[in-house]
Image: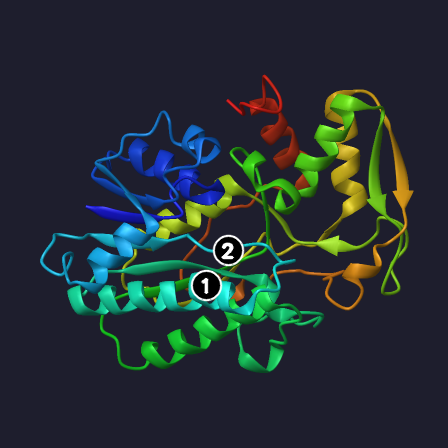
Amino acid sequence: MIIVTGSNGFIGSNLIKELNKNQNTEILAVDDQKDPELQKNIADCNIHKFFDIDEFLGKVENGEFDNKNIEAIFHQGACSDTMEWDSEYLLKNNFYYSKTLLNLAERINAPFIYASSASVYGSGKIFKESKENEDPINLYAFSKYLFDQLVRKRLKSNTSQIAGMRYFNVYGPNESHKGGMASVAYHLHQQLKTGDKVKLFEGTDGYGNGEQRRDFIHVEDVVKVNTWLLNNSNVSGIFNVGTGRSQTFNEVAKAVLEWNQKGSLEYIPFPDKLQGSYQSYTEADISKLRNAGYSENFLDVSSGVKKYLDTLKNWPKNEY
């Protein structure tokens, strides 16, 4: 059996679809099973058993999974809201939850593959997986940073696989439930359903209007890295998962406008509430991932956004 936390969410649901394609159907899906919006994401997935988060954690802490045949744990579950400022809530969901599952993986000698975040780099300009480059600028990023530090300690002594993936800006199908935390491609496309303009922030941090740069990665590529790690259990460590190439928000807007064949671009003032806690530039250094043996190519913004929007229909409720 394979455990997938955050199973009903954006990356988790896409991961389960891929596992199913590879004939993995003994999936233990862990998420908020009461949320009907999340349930839609895995309606067509083949899953062995569903667990609500609290029920699952209770069973883990009671040792009920210690004697189960667990092939791997994919830990995608987290509070991913970068605007969340409740430190107790974030630590519970992003640190203690993760630590409990890491402890389980170590007890049963199972691979532990988990979601970290590029947000740990903060406003830095060097995106390489070493502590001197890390400077989280919001509580979400700090919670991810704390768990990565724990993992670094465990990597020194653990004998089974531990692999953390620092996701950069992920976009693609099954993200509509994320609301304000959904990708810029999602939001720009949605804007064209109710108007004829797409809106980006004016320039900040020395960048021109819409020229802030991020490493945008399609969820399909993220899933490929996850499943590659499953098939290469000798690979451990913390890895950047991006394309290795930064592109501008303007390029995303251009791809959305071209796909819709309508609309124009407008710039709006940069929000005061984001001053000092916004990454205006990210670009993954993926040399560590490449050196570990991952050789697949990544979709660029033009082809990735087109592929994403080609999947959408019955917007915005259903994405397939």
Badge 2 or badge 1: first in the primary sequence: 2
Q: Relative to 282, is 186 above or below?
A: above
Q: Amino acid at mark 2?
A: Cys
Q: Secondary structure at mark 1?
A: helix
Please state if 243 lies on the left or on the right of 259 as rendered.
left
Q: Most extreme residue toward the top, as rendered?
A: 314
Q: Which residue is mark 2?
A: 79
- Per the rendering, the mark at residue 94 is 1
**For residue 84, which quarter of the picture?**
bottom right
Does the image show residue 162?
Answer: yes
Q: Amino acid at mark 1?
A: Asn
Few, some or many residues within 10 Å of mark 1 (<14, 14–19, 20+): many
Please state if 1 lies on the left or on the right of 189 as rendered.
left
Distance from disc 2 to disc 1, alpha carbons, whole Å, reads 6 Å
Q: Residue 22 appears at what percent x and percent y? A: 28, 35
Does the image show residue 127?
Answer: no
Instruction: Out of 5 and 221, give the one closest to the viewer.
Output: 5
Disc 2, disc 1: CB below 8 Å? yes
Residue shown at the point (46%, 55%) measured from the top left = 78
Residue shown at the point (53%, 46%) measured from the top left = 297
Residue shown at the point (44%, 71%) measured from the top left = 147
- Per the rendering, the mark at residue 167 is none
Q: Most extreme residue toward the left, as rendered?
A: 67
Q: Residue 7 appears at what percent x and percent y? A: 38, 43
Instruction: Out of 256 and 27, give the one closest to the viewer.
Output: 27
Q: Relative to 198, is 213 above or below?
A: below
Few, some or many residues within 10 Å of mark 2 (<14, 14–19, 20+): some
Q: Secondary structure at mark 2?
A: loop
